[in-house]
Image: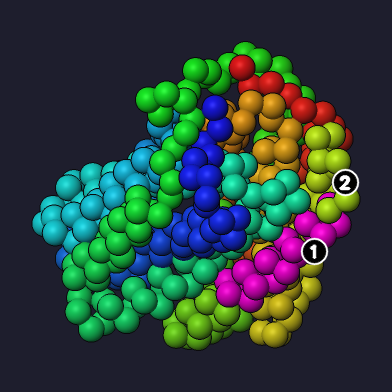
Amino acid sequence: MRDLPVLPAQPLRFRYVIYTLTVLMSVICYADRAALSVGMPVIARVFALSPSQIGWVLSSFLWSYFILNLPGAMLLDRFGARRVGTWAVAFWSIAMMLGGMVTTLPLFLVTRVMLGAGETPTFPLGNKVARAWAPDHERGIMLTALICGLPVGLAAGSIAGAWLITHIGWRAAFLALGGVGLAWSWIWWRAYPRDAAAPGGTTRRILSIRRIFGAAPFWGIVVGQCCANYANFLLMSWLPIILKQVLKLSLIETGVWTAICYLVSAALGLMLGRLGERAMRQQDLRHGTRRWIVGSYFLMATSMGFLPLCQSLPSVVALLAIAMAFLMAGIGANMALLSDLIVEEDLVASTTGLSFTFSNGAGIAAPVVTGYLLQATGNFHGVFYLTAVILLLGVLSIVLLPRRRFHAC
């Protein structure tokens, strides 16, 4: 019942093609998100948006993304990675293109909600692909690469979006970026072998919420994921503002150093993912041994609590890039830990979707809490102290609870 390649002559090295396409999906996902932020000053003038309306537009994709995370993952387990991957990316790419064509604010908001709905299977699909294609001791690095697609996509979307908007306008830029996603969908449909989940492409089992909620290992992974995603969403939403206000940078300097932070952290994160997999090579992963890698990486990510002590540009950028690298490597390893411990292979996407429903809820709270803390204190000191404490909670959860395999149905 696994979503496995069914071509017997398929060379083992073909898995690297699948890995590459899966990571590119993550890059495209976050590049499309970044393009909106880059184009927002122009879009705000077109639609005559107030600051509060800008906030609603920027968060609109999260409405459907949060609500549909689990249903999207369940569709993935039911219909397989080939079909759902193609449908999902094509759907959000069409939504991106429609966003460049509509002429009223309500319709523009609808396109952003559509984009969020299409993006819901992204990380469950990555974990399903890793379970199906990656050897046990290669799974962590593959999923770390998937997570590293996040900062690479944000950097690429910021740079490409700015160039396209400057030269051809934001509407044409949205059409061009949507076209990239449609091209990926066609390649994925052609490259990924036919799904072999069950006759007719459906699965015989569904997720048991009662059983999985009674599994301590699941909650250990979820709490750790929630704590890490709080820090992740904080940096995704506030990093440019933090650099600009703390270091008194110009707009162009802010964009450049934000991109540098993202790209350096992605490169370091991949190195850490590889080191983690080497450490696990001779270990039995069925008893949660990978949790020590996850806990260690999350612990190192708490170094962002020292940011208030940094005053110079090199020290701030270096500490941010290092903390983000450990954070991404830890999130990738945590996804692999979930895949290690769940017994039912055909439910790995649904279980991942359920875990991301919780962690995205925690992530959505991060920008709001940060805003209130900044308003109350006038600086980011408390923001980073709180984030470090939250990450420490995640370390404890990861180290203490995921010690055995568990059933999802």
**Does 294 sit above or below residue 361?**
below
Question: Disc 2 versus disc 1: distance between alpha carbons?
Answer: 14 Å
> Tag 2: Cα neighbours inside 10 Å, few (<14), some, or many (≥20)?
some
Residue at 40%, 55% in the rendered image: 191
Whether the magenta-drawn stretch holds residue 272 is answered as yes
Q: What amino acid is found at the position of numbered circle 1 in the picture?
A: Leu
Left or right: residue 182 compared with residue 331? left
**Does 265 sit above or below residue 363?**
below
Q: Which residue occupies the foreground of this view, 291 or 83?
A: 83
Where does label 2 land, which residue? 283
> Is label 2 in contact with label 1 (beta carbons under 8 Å)?
no
Foreground label between 2 and 1: 2
**Does 390 sit above or below residue 222?**
below
Q: What amino acid is found at the position of numbered circle 2 in the picture?
A: Gln
In the rendered image, the quadrant that contains the N terminus is top right
Q: Check the image and name the residue furthest to the top.
A: 210
Q: Which residue occupies the foreground of this view, 403 or 47?
A: 403
Left or right: residue 284 compared with residue 89? right
Range of magenta residues: 261-280
x then y, percent, for residue 361: 54, 38
Q: Magenta residues: mostly which secondary structure? A: helix
Where does label 1 land, which residue? 275
x then y, percent, for residue 112: 29, 49
**Within the image, what quadrant is residue 131 found in?**
top right
In the rendered image, the quadrant that contains the C terminus is top right
In this view of the protein, can residue 363 be seen by the observer? Answer: no
